[in-house]
Structures are given as structure tokens and as C-alpha cells.
């Protein structure tokens, strides 16, 4: 029996981020990160994004609720980079 490592989880989330919604016929699996653009921070879009990530990558449901987070970092002059943090491992959204 194999153990799922942090690298495996990181690869799963990376695959999810690179797969557009509906990329697999008959499945809603995939990320629509562009949906978060130009949305107000209080709109709940980020929460829905993480909820869909947990639904599409079931291994994340084994982690505590606060182990998966989304955060933004301002990059001068006018860019904002988004990251998904999974138990201390940061994965850039849209990389």
C-alpha cells in the first residue's frame, strides 16, 4: 500500500489548476480561476473556488478545514499573484 505524500497532493492540485472546467467529458472537474478576476473580495468567489477544489480533489477532505487556504500577494507595479496554501505548501494559481 502506498502513502500519499505532500508532493502527490501538490501534483494533484497542480493538475486541477491546469484543467479547465469541463475538460473531461461529462465532468465538472477543473479550475476556473479567472472567475475570481474583477470580483469583490467579499463576494464569496474565493470560498467557492476552494469548496470546488475540495470536491474535485477528495484527498483534501482528509486534511483539517484550515489546511487549505487561498491568499494573494501584491507584486509591483500592478499585479496580484494568487496562491493556494496546502499545509504549508504554496502553489501559484495561474502559473
Image (spheres, rainbow, N blue to C red):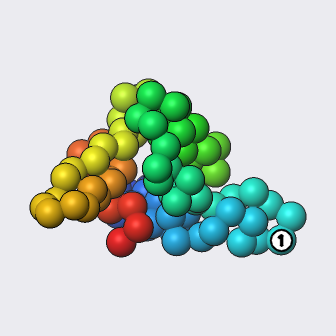
Residue occupying the point 83% across, 71% down = 25
Q: In front: 75, or 32?
A: 75
Residue labelled with disc 1 = 25
Total numbered badges shown on the rendered structure:
1
Circle 1 residues within 10 Å: few <14, some 14–19, many ≥20: few
Q: In front: 15, or 40?
A: 40
Q: In front: 45, or 70?
A: 45
Residue occupying the point 25% across, 61% down = 79
- Residue 31 location in percent, x, y? 58, 59
State the residue lying farthest toward the left.
76
Quadrant in which the C terminus is drawn = bottom left
In this view, 46 is above or below 28: above
Tell me if I can see residue 1 in this picture: no
Tell me if I can see residue 37 in this picture: yes
Residue occupying the point 36% across, 39% down = 69
State the residue lying farthest toward the right.
26
- Residue 51 location in percent, x, y? 57, 38
Residue occupying the point 49% across, 43% down = 39
- Residue 59 location in percent, x, y? 54, 47
- Residue 24 location in percent, x, y? 76, 71
Q: Left or right of 19: which side holds 67?
A: left
Describe the element under mark 1 as helix, strand or loop: loop
Amino acid at each position: 500500500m502506498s502513502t500519499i505524500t505532500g508532493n502527490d497532493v501538490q501534483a494533484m492540485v497542480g493538475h486541477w489548476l491546469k484543467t479547465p472546467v469541463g475538460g473531461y467529458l461529462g465532468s465538472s472537474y477543473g479550475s476556473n480561476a479567472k472567475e475570481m478576476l474583477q470580483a469583490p473580495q467579499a463576494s464569496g468567489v474565493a470560498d467557492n473556488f476552494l469548496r470546488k477544489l475540495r470536491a474535485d480533489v477528495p484527498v483534501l477532505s482528509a486534511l483539517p478545514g484550515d489546511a487549505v487556504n487561498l491568499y494573494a500577494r501584491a507584486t509591483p507595479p500592478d499585479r496580484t499573484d494568487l496562491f493556494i496554501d496546502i499545509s504549508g505548501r504554496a502553489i501559484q494559481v495561474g502559473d
